[in-house]
C-alpha cells in the first residue's frame, strides 16, 4: 500500500477507534485507576454483551497507553470472541499492529473495513455510542461529550431502540445535575430541571420496555430513578406522563423493585445503602453497604460506608437518650457525650441550638457560651423564636423538622452552639435554597466526639478509598470533616489543603469542592485561634484564615453568575466583611472591602466604598476612578460612569486609562441612549467615541488629515449608483447626521478635467477612514474606476478600511473588520434608530481597528 494512502487510511481508522480519547487521558495513575474499575465491571455478571465488548475495548486501549502491549492484545482477543461485529475493536487492533511496525497485518485488517458489514450505518452508530460510553466513564469533565454522543446515536438508530444506550444517557444526565460535578459556568447545568426530567423519562421508558431480558439494567434504572425522585413525592411530579402508573412510583418503590430484580447486585446494594442513609435508616444503610463491599470493594462503597458511620455518630449525639443516660448515671456515656462540643467560626453572626423536637413544635434557645460569639451578634430569644415560627408557618411538621435541621447547620446533632445560615436570617427560605445549602456540604458547626470508634472506622474506610483512587478528593474532603469531629484540626487541615494545592495539578477544576475546601481551612484556622496562647501564632493563623477565605471568594466570583445562591450560602463573605468593617476605615481597608463586594457582584456596595476612598484621598487616583466607572457600568448607571470619566478627560491622568475601556464606556452609554430613543445624548456619546478614535489613529500615523479639503470618510461603492443605491444613502446619512462627518462617495467630488483614478488614490490616502460597501449589483453598472482603486486599497489602505457587507455577499478580504447588514435592513420603520445602531456597530469595529490595537502595542 502506498505510504500516503496508508497514512490517510490510518487517520480515518484512528477516528473510528478508542484513540480519539487521547486528549481526554490525564496521566498514568488515572489510567491505572480506570483500568481497575473496568476490570471489576467485567468480573460482574452484566447481562448485555454490548457493554462487555465496550469494556474490553476500553481496557485494551488503556493498556496500550500504559505500554503493556501483551495485555492490550489479550483484551482485543476477548472482545473478538463475542459475536457482535465491532468497529472500535477492529480499528484499535489495526492501530496496535501499525504502531508495532507489523504493517502487513495492519493493512490486511484495513481491507476488512471495506466490506459491507463495517460500512453499515448501524455498526458506525454503535461505534459513536461506544465512544460516548467511554467519555461517560472518564468523569464529569467529559460528560458533555458523552451526552452529545448518546443523543446522536439514539437518534440515528430510531425507530429502533437500545435501552442500554438510553440508560447510560440517563445516568450521565443525572450526574450532570450534581452540584459537586459542576466544572465551570460555560458547561454548568445551570437549571438541572430539564436534565432531571429527560433522565427520568428515559429511565421510565427503559423500565416499561417489553423485554424479560436485561433485568440488571432495569434494576439499575430503578435505582437511578429513585435517586432522581428522592425528595419528590412521586415520579408524576417530575415527568407528568402516564399518570395512573407514575403516581404509584415513589423513591421507596424504586428500590423495592430493584431488589426484586437483583437482590445480590453490587450497584443495587450500594445505591440502596446510600438512599437509606439519606432517610436516616443508618443501621440498614450500614448493613447494605457492608454487603456491597463484600461483593465489590471499591472506593465509592468505602466512601459511602464512612458517611453512614459519620451519620450514626451525629444521630447518636442528638438522641434524647443523652439526658436519660446522664440521669441514670451511665458514666461511660457521660464521658463520651461530655467530650462532644462544637467548633465554629468566631465571627459568626447568630448562634442557636435546638433543644427539643416535639410532636407539634420545637423550641430554640440562644447560646449562652460567649466564647463562640460576640454579644452584639447574639439573637434575642424572643426574636429568634418569632423568626422560626414565621419560617414554619404553613409548613408541615415534616417540613419544620427539616428546617430545624437546617438551623442546626444540617448536622442533625445535639450540641451547644449552632450557626444560623445567612440565607435563613431574612426568613426567606425557598425549597431550592434549603436544598442548595444541604447539597453544598460545608458545615461551620460540627459535633466533636474524640476517639469515637465509629469515626475512627470511618477514617479507615476513607483512607482505603483514597489508596484505591488517589484523585478521590470527595473522600479526602469527608476525611477532613471527620477529623474535625475527632477534634484533630491539624489532620483536617492537611486533607483540605491537599485538595486546594496547586501542586496537585487541578486548579479550580471542580469549583464547589474548592470553595468548600478553602472554607473549611478557614474554619479550622479560626477555631485554632481560640486555643492558641502565643500571640504571634494567633496573628499568623488569622492571616492564613483570611487568605483561605479570599481564595474561596475568588473561586465563588467565577461561578456566582451560574450559582447566585452562593452569595448567601457561603461563610467566607460575611466573616471577611465583618473583619474588614471592624478595622480602621483607611483607604486600604476600604479597597479590600470594595474588592470583596465586587467579587460577590454587590456593585452598589462597591460603589459606596470607592466613593469613600475618593473622599479620603487628597488627589484623584485614576485606578480607583476606573474601578468606580466599571461598577457604575455593571449597574447600568451610564450617566455617573461617564461623569466620572469626564473628571480626567482633560488632564494628563486620562493617559493612564486603558483607551479601549474609555471608549467602551461611551459606546455602551450611546447604546443605552439609542434604546431609550434619546438620540441627542446618543450623538454626544458617539462623538466622544469618534474623537478618541481620531486621537489614537493619528498616533498610528495612518490617516492624518493634513488638508481639510479632503473628507473624513471615503465610501467606495462598486455599483456606481450613489444617487439611487439603497445602501449608500443611509450609511452616508448616519455618519453625517450623528457625528457631523465630511463624507464623499466614490469620485463624486472629482473636478471636471481631473484624473478620476488619481483623485481616488489621493482621497484614499488623505481620508481618515475608508468604508467599502459590498453588495450584489448589476455587472453592467459596475464602476471600472472603483475596480482599479480597489487594487490600490488592497496594497496600501486595508488597515483603515471598514467593510460593510450585505448578508449573502461573499468577501475576499480575510482578517478585515466588517459589519454585516441584513437584506431587510433598508426597509425599517425608524430610520434614525436604524442609523444609530449601524453607527454603533461601525464604531465598535473602528475601536478594534485603532484603539484596542494601540493598547496592545503599548
Image (cartoon, rainbow, N blue to C red):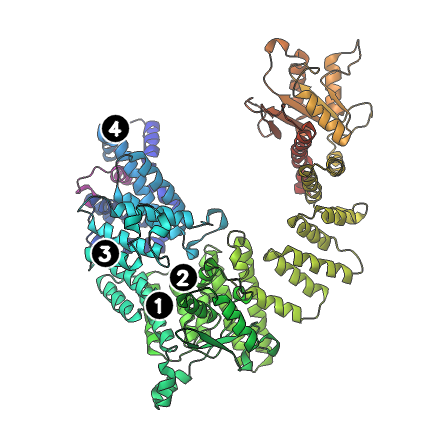
Q: Magenta stretch: dominant SS? A: helix
Q: Which residues are magenta?
A: 78-104
The numbered mark, 1 or 4, whose residue comes first in the sequence reads 4
The numbered mark, 1 or 3, whose residue comes first in the sequence reads 3
Distance between the alpha carbons at the discs numbered 1 and 4: 54 Å
- State yes or no: discs 1 and 4 in contact (Cβ < 8 Å): no
Q: Residue 529, how many percent across, how many down?
A: 55, 77
- Residue 294 visible in the displayed image: yes
Q: Is residue 813 left or right of residue 502?
A: right
Tell which of 573 and 745 is nearer to you.
573
Q: Residue 181, how many percent across, how many down?
A: 42, 54
Q: Of helix, strand and loop, which one carries label 4? A: loop
Mark 4 lies on residue:
114
Q: Residue 625, how many percent across, how many down?
A: 73, 53
Q: Residue 594, how many percent across, how many down?
A: 66, 60
Mark 1 lies on residue:
307
Mark 1 surroundings within 10 Å by alpha-carbon count, few (fewer than 14), some (14 through 19), many (20 or more): many
The numbered mark, 2 or 3, whose residue comes first in the sequence reads 3
- Residue 17 visible in the displayed image: no
Residue 473: numbered disc: 2
Distance between the alpha carbons at the discs numbered 2 and 3: 33 Å
The numbered mark, 4 or 3, whose residue comes first in the sequence reads 4
Mark 3 lies on residue:
257
- State yes or no: discs 1 and 2 in contact (Cβ < 8 Å): no
The numbered mark, 4 or 2, whose residue comes first in the sequence reads 4
Q: Of helix, strand and loop, which one carries label 1? A: helix
Residue 580 sits above or below residue 601 on the image: below
Amino acid at each position: 500500500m502506498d505510504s500516503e494512502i496508508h497514512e490517510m487510511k490510518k487517520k480515518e481508522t484512528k477516528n473510528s477507534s478508542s484513540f480519539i480519547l487521547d486528549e481526554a487521558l490525564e496521566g498514568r495513575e488515572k489510567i491505572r485507576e480506570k483500568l481497575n474499575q473496568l476490570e471489576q465491571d467485567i468480573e460482574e455478571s452484566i447481562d448485555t454483551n454490548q457493554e462487555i465488548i465496550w469494556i474490553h475495548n476500553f481496557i485494551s486501549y488503556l493498556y496500550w497507553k500504559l505500554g503493556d502491549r501483551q495485555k492490550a492484545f489479550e483484551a482485543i482477543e476477548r472482545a473478538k470472541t463475542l459475536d457482535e461485529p465491532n468497529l472500535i475493536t477492529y480499528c484499535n487492533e489495526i492501530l496496535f499492529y501499525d504502531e508495532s511496525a507489523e504493517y502487513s497485518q495492519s493493512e490486511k485488517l484495513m481491507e476488512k473495513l471495506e466490506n459491507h458489514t463495517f460500512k453499515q450505518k448501524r455498526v458506525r452508530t454503535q461505534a459513536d455510542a461506544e465512544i460516548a460510553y467511554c467519555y461517560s466513564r472518564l468523569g464529569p469533565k467529559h460528560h458533555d461529550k458523552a451526552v452529545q454522543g448518546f443523543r446522536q446515536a439514539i437518534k440515528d438508530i430510531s425507530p429502533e431502540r437500545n435501552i442500554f444506550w438510553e440508560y447510560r444517557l440517563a445516568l450521565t444526565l443525572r450526574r450532570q445535575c450534581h452540584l459537586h460535578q459542576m466544572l465551570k459556568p460555560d458547561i454548568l447545568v445551570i437549571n438541572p430541571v430539564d436534565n432531571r426530567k429527560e433522565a427520568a423519562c428515559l429511565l421510565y421508558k427503559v423500565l416499561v420496555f417489553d423485554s424479560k431480558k436485561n433485568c440488571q439494567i432495569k434494576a439499575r434504572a430503578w435505582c437511578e430513578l429513585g435517586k432522581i425522585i428522592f425528595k419528590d413525592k412521586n415520579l408524576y411530579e417530575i415527568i407528568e406522563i402516564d399518570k395512573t402508573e407514575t403516581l404509584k412510583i415513589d423513591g421507596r418503590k424504586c428500590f423495592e423493585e430493584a431488589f426484586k430484580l437483583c437482590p445480590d447486585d453490587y450497584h443495587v446494594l450500594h445505591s440502596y445503602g446510600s438512599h437509606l442513609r439519606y432517610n436516616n435508616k443508618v443501621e440498614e444503610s450500614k448493613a447494605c453497604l457492608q454487603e456491597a463491599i463484600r461483593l465489590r470493594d471499591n472506593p465509592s462503597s468505602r466512601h459511602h460506608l464512612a458517611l453512614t458511620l459519620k451519620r450514626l455518630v451525629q444521630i447518636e449525639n442528638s438522641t434524647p437518650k443523652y439526658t436519660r443516660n446522664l440521669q441514670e448515671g451511665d458514666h461511660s456515656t457521660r464521658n463520651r457525650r461530655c467530650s462532644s462540643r462544637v467548633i465554629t467560626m468566631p465571627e459568626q453572626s447568630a448562634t442557636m441550638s435546638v433543644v427539643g423536637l416535639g410532636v407539634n413544635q420545637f423550641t430554640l434557645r440562644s447560646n449562652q457560651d460567649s466564647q463562640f460569639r460576640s454579644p452584639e451578634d447574639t439573637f434575642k430569644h424572643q426574636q429568634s423564636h418569632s423568626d422560626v415560627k414565621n419560617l414554619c408557618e404553613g409548613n408541615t411538621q415534616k417540613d419544620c423538622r427539616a428546617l430545624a435541621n437546617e438551623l442546626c447547620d444540617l448536622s442533625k446533632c445535639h450540641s451547644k452552639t449552632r450557626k444560623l445560615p445567612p440565607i435563613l436570617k431574612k426568613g426567606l427560605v425557598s425549597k431550592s435554597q434549603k436544598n442548595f445549602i444541604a447539597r453544598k456540604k460545608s458545615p461551620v458547626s460540627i459535633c466533636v466526639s474524640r476517639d469515637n470508634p465509629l469515626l475512627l472506622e470511618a477514617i479507615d474506610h476513607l483512607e482505603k478509598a483514597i489508596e484505591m483512587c488517589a484523585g478521590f478528593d470527595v473522600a479526602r474532603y469527608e476525611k477532613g470533616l471527620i477529623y474535625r469531629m475527632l477534634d484533630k484540626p491539624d489532620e483536617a487541615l492537611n486533607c483540605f489543603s491537599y485538595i486546594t494545592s496547586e501542586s496537585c495539578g487541578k486548579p479550580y477544576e471542580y469549583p464547589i469542592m474548592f470553595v468548600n475546601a478553602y472554607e473549611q481551612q478557614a474554619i479550622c484556622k479560626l477555631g485554632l485561634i481560640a486555643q492558641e496562647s502565643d500571640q504571634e501564632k494567633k496573628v499568623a493563623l488569622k492571616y492564613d484564615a483570611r487568605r483561605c477565605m479570599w481564595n474561596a471568594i475568588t473561586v465563588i466570583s467565577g461561578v456566582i453568575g451560574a450559582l447566585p445562591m452562593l452569595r448567601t450560602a457561603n461563610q467566607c463573605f460575611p466573616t471577611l466583611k465583618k473583619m474588614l468593617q471592624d478595622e480602621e476605615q483607611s483607604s486600604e481597608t476600604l479597597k479590600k472591602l470594595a474588592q470583596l463586594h465586587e467579587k460577590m457582584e454587590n456593585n452598589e456596595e462597591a460603589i459606596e466604598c470607592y466613593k469613600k476612598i475618593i473622599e479620603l484621598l487628597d488627589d484623584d487616583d485614576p485606578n480607583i476612578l476606573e474601578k468606580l466607572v466599571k461598577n457604575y457600568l455593571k449597574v447600568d448607571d451610564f450617566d455617573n460612569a461617564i461623569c466620572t470619566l469626564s473628571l480626567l478627560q482633560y488632564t494628563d491622568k486620562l493617559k493612564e486609562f486603558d483607551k479601549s475601556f474609555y471608549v467602551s464606556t461611551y459606546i455602551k452609554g450611546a447604546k443605552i441612549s439609542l434604546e431609550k430613543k434619546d438620540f441627542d445624548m446618543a450623538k454626544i456619546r458617539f462623538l466622544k467615541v469618534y474623537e478618541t478614535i481620531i486621537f489614537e489613529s493619528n498616533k498610528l500615523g495612518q490617516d492624518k488629515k493634513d488638508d481639510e479639503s479632503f473628507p473624513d470618510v471615503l465610501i467606495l461603492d462598486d455599483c456606481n449608483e450613489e444617487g439611487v443605491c439603497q445602501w449608500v444613502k443611509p450609511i452616508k446619512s448616519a455618519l453625517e447626521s450623528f457625528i457631523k462627518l465630511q463624507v464623499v462617495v466614490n469620485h463624486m467630488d472629482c473636478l471636471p478635467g481631473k484624473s478620476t483614478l488619481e483623485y481616488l488614490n489621493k482621497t484614499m490616502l488623505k481620508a481618515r477612514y475608508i468604508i467599502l460597501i459590498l453588495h450584489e449589483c448589476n455587472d453592467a453598472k459596475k464602476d471600472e474606476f472603483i475596480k482599479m482603486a480597489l487594487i490600490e486599497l488592497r496594497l496600501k489602505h486595508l488597515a483603515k478600511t471598514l467593510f460593510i457587507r450585505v448578508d449573502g455577499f461573499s468577501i475576499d478580504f480575510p482578517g478585515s473588520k466588517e459589519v454585516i447588514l441584513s437584506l431587510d435592513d433598508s426597509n425599517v420603520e425608524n430610520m434614525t434608530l436604524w442609523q444609530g445602531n449601524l453607527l454603533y456597530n461601525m464604531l465598535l469595529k473602528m475601536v478594534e481597528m485603532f484603539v484596542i490595537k494601540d493598547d496592545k502595542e503599548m
